Image (cartoon, rainbow, N blue to C red):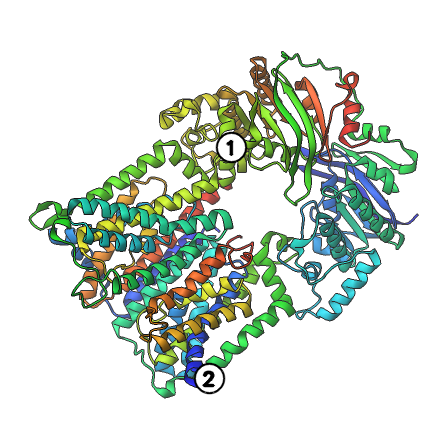
Amino acid sequence: MKARVPILFACGILLMIGSLMIVHAPIGEAVATIFQGSLGNLKKISGTIKEMTPLLILGSAVYLALKAGLFNIGAEGQYLVGACFACQTMVMVPGPVGVGLGCLVGIVTGALWALPAGLIKAFRNGHEVITTIMLNAVAANMTKALVAGPFKGKGQLVPSTAVLPVNSQLTPLFTFRDLEIPQSFVIGIVVVVGLAYWLNKTVAGYELKASGANPTAAQFAGIKTKQVTVKAMLMSGGLAGLAGALQVAQFEHRFYDGFATGYGFDALGVSLLVGSNPLFLLASSFFFGLLNKGGTALSLIGVNKGITMVVLAVVIVMFAAVRYGRKQVNHG
Amino acid sequence: MILAVSMQGISKQYGSVQALGNVTFEVEKGTIHALVGENGAGKTTLMRALYGAMQPDSGSITVNGQAAHFHDSRAAIDAGIGMVSQHYGIIGELTNLDNLVLGAEGGPVLMKGSMEQRANELAASMGFEFDWAAESSTLSPAGGQKLEILKLLWRNSQIMILDEPTAMLSPQDSDALYESLKQLAANGATVIVVTHRIAEVFEHCRRVTVLRGGVKVADHDVADVKPEQLAEEIVGGTVIERPVPVSNERSNIRLRIDALSVRGSKGETAVKGIDLQVKSGQLVGIAGVDGNGQRELFHALIGVSKPMSGSFSFDGNQWDTEPGSTRILEGLRVIPEDRHDEGVIEEWSLYDNSALGLQRLPVFRRLTSAMKSEAPVMAEMFKTKHGNLSDSMGSLSGGNQQRFVAGRALRIDPQMILAFQPARGLDLNSTTKVYQEIRKACDEGACAIVVSFDLDELLDFCDRIVVMCHGHLSEPKPEEARDRAAIGRLMVGAE
Amino acid sequence: MVSFLLQIITMSAPLILMAMAGYMSERSGVINIGLEGKMLAGCFICAAAGAHFGAVGGLAFAILACIALSLLHWSLTQMYRIDHIISGMAVNLLASGFTGFMDSSGIWKTTLTDSQRLPLPMYYAIAVISPFLLFAMAGRTQFGLRHKSVGSDPDKARLLGIHPQRVRFSALIMTGVFAGLAGSLLVTETSGFTKEMTSGRGYIALAALILGGWRPIPATAACLLFGVAKAVQIRFSGTPIFNFDIPSEIWNMLPYIVTLLALAGLLGRNRTPAGLGKH
């Protein structure tokens, strides 16, 4: 029994090394490339920060839901819907006002996109994972139809909105040679810190965590757990929508078919690795950003990014297994 | 007289607790035999030994004249013994027929035709009727109980153990159930009924065995014994002179319950239109055997379940329509039954647990700092043994969790204290201390309701005792208010 | 008309096989969002092994690989007691990463010649027959009954001497078999592996399973419904209906929206197995 978790670890590591060996990839070089490609110079660090930015906010979104006992796999869809509508808003209303309005629209539409999942979970006992998977697929199709139709920008050859006017595009907050710190990165850090404060210092945050940790005890403590479920999904969706809006304003400057690149699923991984202190979101999203950026570099030397997904799968499983092991000790 | 079951000198020790001490239990073939006793008297333990679910430390078991050594339930089932436990064993999503045969299908392929034929024969022999293709979730509690009995017949049980079979049934359904059992007995089956309802014993059973504190107290032909005598044997006849707790009762009524009915988890009416008024300063104990509606009453008062009908108010605030959080703001404090599930969050630290349930009180407006200052006080109140207050609650033993939960409930201005088995897992000293604190709050004007299955504990500490039996609430006559035997009779429905 | 019917079959058959894979797992109580990954792994292994060992070898290895992945899922959920969602996600990540990585490394050939492919009608026949077989299994066999009981209430089943973990072990093996078949079918149709070629079919199959109330025949009906929607989309794309050109995305969304309505309880009662995700 005691050997179980170590066995799992051994298998995971063997799997990673084995995969690399099958394709005769030089293991040392692969690892070096990941670090070189993500942290090698200021430009590469900027790239890692860029990858990390949406994950900060999306990770916060998923983490908040997780604390309420919900797996918000739907962050991807909420992010898409938020980005799509925010982008159209920013196209129609140029300038800083439009950006503010766009963020607001992103938050609202993202929250609304999460609402059905919250309601079905609270009042129909339908698993939020299933509903959000469905909502993700609907979101992908719906936004695609929108940018191919009503939201399509003039002169765009592919399904895409118009490009944001220059005065709506967020500039980097801070530049030092090749190092760029985007504004949305700072907003992301603010979101993480704000979330940490809200969860740990406020009664509302306390009640949300209680509902997630032990719904029965929460009910005995006078907490309306169903309302908390709906609220958590709304907040989570709102944050995901904000992430989408900022991604448009800061980096993409338009919304197009294929806008999502799996950030929503990465965010789930980000939040699963966090544990009990929300500030670890910073480290966790950095790790994911590093893997994403380093993975791109890896594909340049002929090793597919897929290996980084394998690494993630192994890390997540190990983390979950260790947490289970700890619980066992407590109950024993 | 042919003995179907003969258990001789059965003893079982759990840790330092003697669950069964040299118990002898004999059941005549073809009869309905009642096994009665209070909670914790050892009834279920004795039956688990017969069913092979527990191995006694010593003693011998003979079934139909053959020495039996059951290492597991499978062996007991093969010997023709079947048991319906208190835990409802019907899976709602399966059909009635599926539930009937599950685990005893008789081969890899289900012969639906012949299965249904045999099922119908069994049902007909008992006078039951079942729609075999219907889902079992549609069964009434009585229908479920009938199906459980058919499950035993399906497995060819000749000796049937029924643990509190009428707990969820209406009187009519109970009577019908016993009619079927009598028929089974007439056909040569042996039925052992574990119960605490004396009325059932006198109406339906041939013999009765009384257990108390793990020891056999008496064995009677039902015809030879009077209800009063049996009730006394169950709760114990020893009368210890004890001082009546002094109460500082005032005239103003704080909690007022009117015609309250609450539904139980299986859809039955668990609390049946009870009335109760509690005055400032009163510490009311609810006596009764487990499962007579006390739990459901508590859940309604706390706000985790909604009443079917009736109302209740505290200080004129209509609590039945207010959310639970408001009740807490108005002074409700709870020591829940299952601290593990209902009272604490085990993954959290003691600090974090200190605000649970009280989080909206003004004291906790500055949440983190308030938890830092309150947790040590709550832990100290009943001497909770803990490593560090930042350790997880799960690292504490059950008794220490209970100490912490009690401290939390009584620490900040309690006005209406609800305590369900507050002494569970506590030693005598801590128990006294908890009741003293409750009493102190009452003396300052609060009121309290305590549920316990231990009558002596209630007599020791409560100034007023009411009894719940089968969902009804009753109060002993004023002259018998402290009379252990009289209360015992109410508890088992002998009056 | 014939081509239209063929189109429906082509669209539905892999979904049906995947829905059956999902049925075996979910009805026994193991939440399976890892269907997508299992199917993808089936595709890749069938293509790679088929190119090496021929048609039968391709299918055999695909099934074996999917069984292995299923049993990994089993051990994560049943032995390590890792949350079913997390372990399902890990399976998906693993499959997606591994197939993408192996495919682009190019060390294994993943295109099939005609002789390396089993005839499509065989797969279609299996897709048609298996729902009925599973229906019969559920209603007429000891295993079927126990399978259902552990998915409904593992604790009560345990009291009756049934071992939920063992039943789920067998069930997940069958999940692997069906996923292997579905993956092979997809590869056989397209003659080769392409990255992420399952493109959400695992999730659609899951949707069909939910829509069918976790029952084989209604789930198959839901797959057919989705197949028809897709076939109609292909047939009529670009053709305005009532002067309105319905974007293909609307058709694509349909299965998911219908499933959402079902989960919201707007299409009859919720039939989620009560023991889903429980130990």
x then y, percent, for residue B187: 88, 55
- Nearest to the observer: residue A5 or residue C150: C150
Q: Is residue A162 left or right of residue C67?
A: left
x then y, percent, for residue B14: 66, 37
The chain containing the residue under callout 2 comes to C
Amino acid under disc 1? Pro
- Nearest to the observer: residue B264 or residue A1: B264
Q: Is residue B406 left or right of residue A177?
A: right
Image height of B403 relative to A33, above or below: above
x then y, percent, for residue B225: 90, 33
**Discs 2/1, front:** 1
Circle 1 SS class: loop
Q: Which residue is mark 1?
A: B323
- Nearest to the observer: residue B312 or residue B193: B312
The chain containing the residue under callout 1 comes to B
Q: Is residue B442 visible?
A: yes
Residue at image position (31%, 37%) is: A196
Answer yes or no: do the residues labelled 2 and 1 have beta carbons within 8 Å? no
Badge 2: few (under 14), some or many (20 or more) residues near its Cα, within 10 Å? few
Q: Is residue A309 left or right of residue B475?
A: left
Q: Which residue is mark 2?
A: C121
Circle 2 SS class: helix
Q: Is residue B422 visible?
A: no
Q: Quadrant of residue C158?
A: bottom right
Image height of C222 relative to A209, above or below: below
Residue at image position (38%, 80%) is: C189
Residue at image position (44%, 47%) is: A325
Amino acid under disc 2? Pro
Residue at image position (90%, 38%) is: B221
Badge 1: few (under 14), some or many (20 or more) residues near its Cα, within 10 Å? some
x then y, percent, for residue B450: 63, 25
